[in-house]
Image (cartoon, grey):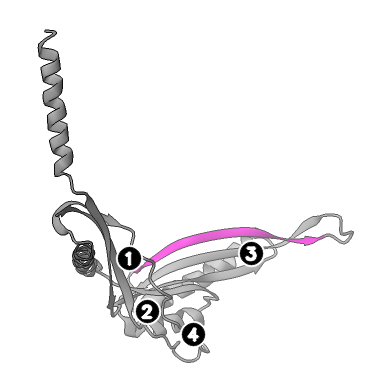
Amino acid sequence: MRILLPLILVSTMGLASASLADMTGNLTVTGISTIAEVPDMATIALGVTTNGATAAAAMSANSEALAAVMKRLKAAGIDDRDIQTSNLTLNPDFVPNSAGTANEIQGYTANNMLTIRVRALDKTGAVLDAAIADGANTLNSLTFGLQTPRPEEDKARKAAVADAIARAKLLAEAAGSKLGQILSIQETSAPEPGPGPMYRMADAATAVPVAGGEVEVSAAVTIVFALGQ
């Protein structure tokens, strides 16, 4: 046993040396792709804010106004599945007392917000107009997107991989190396898209003008390549 042990150690060291000699390093590259598409859906966050002397009065007025808004939205062609309550609050309104020593409740404010999906963009302005005409007095946001984003996301992923490979080839060539096989691929967070399209409110007597513009679908992948000499 004392004779075999040194022989085994020498053999293992020889294998390790050979392995180190074969290693030539690797290259890590991130590919990014952003595709612009015409949106086919709008998402609106709007609601009703009401005040009342009591909590019950504020909520009752809010419920009545919101029911009218929802009825008008459905008349404008919005399906039940595309209307969702996203926030409901009821808060006391505090004001300083006459002595200025403390706050006291002087009425209540009820707020009920809806998230609405509009699947026909040409109806977006009419939907906003209908909601405002029947009592919606709070508009939080208007955004545009795609009803089925997966095909465009996959297109962006493929373009991101192509971008990573092109970058890797360029860098390897500049470094005097040969690009080897792919060792790993990882999808990473894509850059945040730029500012969304601008929109403006108009008088409720006319259809609210909106412009969908384009939406961006982004993807990013990080690929590790082996390098050869």
N-terminal label among 2 and 1: 2
**Distance between mark 4 and mark 3 Cα atoms:** 26 Å
**Distance between mark 1 and mark 4 Cα atoms:** 27 Å
Dot 2 falls on a residue whose secondary structure is helix
> Percent position (x, y) of residue 97?
84, 59
N-terminal label among 2 and 4: 2
Magenta stretch: includes residue 108: no
Q: Amino acid at mark 2?
A: Ala
- Range of residues picked out in magenta: 82-96
39 w.r.t. 82: above or below: below
Q: Are marks 2 and 3 in contact (CB under 8 Å)?
A: no
Quadrant the C terminus occupies: bottom left
Packing grade of label 3 (10 A; few <14, some 14-19, many >=20) is many
Identify the mark at residue 173; answer none if there is no mark: none
* Prevalent SS, magenta region: strand
Observer-nearest of 160 and 165: 165
Image-quadrant location for residue 8: top left
Name the residue carrying label 4: 200
